[in-house]
Image: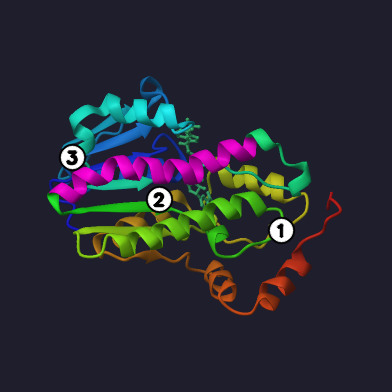
Amino acid sequence: MDLTGTTALVTGANRGIGRAITEALAAAPLSVVLAGVRDPEAFEPIKPPPGGAGEVRAVRFDLASRKKIDASCDELGDQLGEIDLLVNNAGLMTGGLLEEQEMADVYAMFQVNLVAVAHLTSRVLPGMLKRGRGKIVNNASISGYAYFPSASTYAASKAGVVALSESLRRELHGTGVTVLHLVTPGVKTDMLKATEEVYGRHIDTSKWDKIEPEAWAAKVLAAIERDAHVLGPGGKTSLAKLASRGPAALLDGISRQMFSRTPRT
Ligand SMILES: NC(=O)c1ccc[n+]([C@@H]2O[C@H](COP(=O)([O-])OP(=O)(O)OC[C@H]3O[C@@H](n4cnc5c(N)ncnc54)[C@H](OP(=O)(O)O)[C@@H]3O)[C@@H](O)[C@H]2O)c1
């Protein structure tokens, strides 16, 4: 995709991976980068460098319910139909033994990680289809492929994102609108820190690959520009993606080595 003169919307743009992707887009020759955040007043402004985007503007995007998503879309008005690139990035993490997980957190997580991706995409697609061009980028995870214990609900949401992305990609064939899903590895953000704490009770997380948000964002931008339909995690994590497509015994073996139902500490 040629980003010149385009309009992008990134959800969860205030911190972590979303912030890094927004900064990377700000350095490219887009017309407008809409930084979707829950609180636009609290958004730390991004000034595009020379040769970069025309403007980076914070817009309210709360994905916590059907009503809030529709309200956020309506608030954007006509600009919703002008989005060429939608990056569904915002997300929540749940983990631990299933019977110990807080069900309110699980419902909230499925809403933001999966239902919101379908809903927001359905609101943005008509404009893209009308213009015969556009790209949807969905932030999945290695958990969308490799289903390890302690990650049951989160992995289910991300497997859903992978399925949604691939089904939609085929549905949109020939329309000029394309879909890319990100098999995101460990990226050093607040979520990764929380994940290590929550999963770490039962899983040895010490050998996980961890990369900087800026390094991942640079790969995401390159994948957008070369029209890839999937961005693999790279590093050691790519072996987990590969193993997930082999016999279940492969991941069963790894799982037995690193997981304990009894808390590790
Ligand atoms: N970090 C990793 O290792 C990793 C690995 C694989 C996949 N991922 C995926 O990458 C994406 C970004 O993760 P991250 O690591 O950057 O996480 P993060 O630092 O925790 O940031 C999460 C972002 O999602 C936003 N968000 C949460 N609930 C929202 C809601 N109801 N409405 C709108 N925005 C909401 C947050 O906004 P507030 O600041 O307002 O809370 C924040 O901007 C997620 O989809 C995550 O599952 C991350």
Report x, y in % for residue 33.
25, 39
Q: Are marks 3 and 1 in contact (CB under 8 Å)?
A: no
Q: Residue furthest bottom?
A: 247
Q: Is mark 1 within 8 Å of ligand 1?
A: no
Q: Tell whether position 124 is magenta.
A: yes
C-alpha gap between disc 2 and disc 3: 27 Å
Report x, y in % for residue 206.
69, 58
- Residue at label 1? 149
Magenta part of the protein: which range? Answer: 105-130
- Amino acid carrying label 1: it is Pro
- Amino acid carrying label 3: it is Glu
- Amino acid carrying label 2: it is Glu
- Residue at label 2? 214
- Residue at label 3? 82
* Mark toward the start of the polypeptide (2 vs 3): 3
C-alpha gap between disc 3 and disc 1: 42 Å
User: Badge 3 local density, few (<14 within 10 Å), some, or many (20+)?
Assistant: many
* Relative vertical location of residue 169 with respect to residue 131 in this rendering, above or below: below
Name the residue: 42% across, 27% down: 68
